Amino acid sequence: MSVTKITPMTITLYGIPNCDTVKKARSWLADAGVAYSFHDFKKQGVPPERLDHWLATSGWQKLLNRQGNTWRKLDPATQAQAADAAGARALMLAQPSVIKRPVVEWNARAVTVGFDAADWAARKSA
């Protein structure tokens, strides 16, 4: 007979503390009693190997936030450099605020981009 050890979910939330969506996400996790670690893009930067994982699982189009203030403040030439995966990756490393937030790694496998309370509740109870 084998016994499967149940371990708590390891969650890492990546973002910027003053982002409204990140604030909502952090509040939701706290209210749901879900433990997580927070990675601050402003203080800690974007880990290139994690960005590569997010790009592979979510796609650069989903990660690149073209609706935010940072994107709108970029000159057209800089925006044009993000027309493909390589250009978007370079821009995200240089300007972490253009990454749609929050990015959440659920047990370092599944990745979500943005905040969706219903999806998160399903993940929590899975």
Image (cartoon, rainbow, N blue to C red):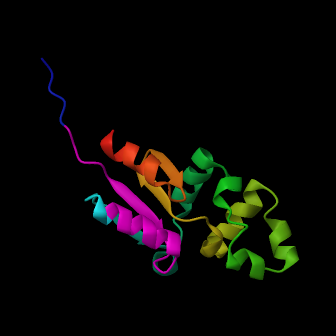
Question: Considering only vertical position in the picture, is 69 above or below 99?
Answer: below
Residue 107 visible? The answer is no
Choose top left, top right, bottom left or bottom right for residue 70.
Answer: bottom right
Where in the figure is residue 58, as x and y percent of width and height? 60, 48
Quarter of the N terminus within the rendering: top left
The structure residue drawn at horizontal position 73% and vertical position 74%, both measured from the top left corner, is 71
Which residue is rendered at x = 39% and y = 60% of the image? 12
In the displayed image of the protein, which residue is found farthest to the top?
Answer: 1
- Can residue 84 be seen by looking at this rendering? yes
Residue stretch in magenta: 6-29
- Position of the C terminus, as image quadrant, is top left
Q: Is residue 53 above or below residue 76?
A: above
Q: Is residue 116 left or right of residue 60?
A: left
Q: Residue at x 87, y 76 (%)?
A: 76
Indicate whether residue 14 is drawn in magenta.
Answer: yes
Q: Is residue 126 left or right of residue 25?
A: left
In front of the other: 124 or 53: 124
Is residue 113 depicted above or below 74 in this figure? above
In screen coordinates, is 124 left or right of 81?
Answer: left
Question: Magenta span has 69?
Answer: no
The image shows residue 50 at horizontal and vertical percentages of 51, 57
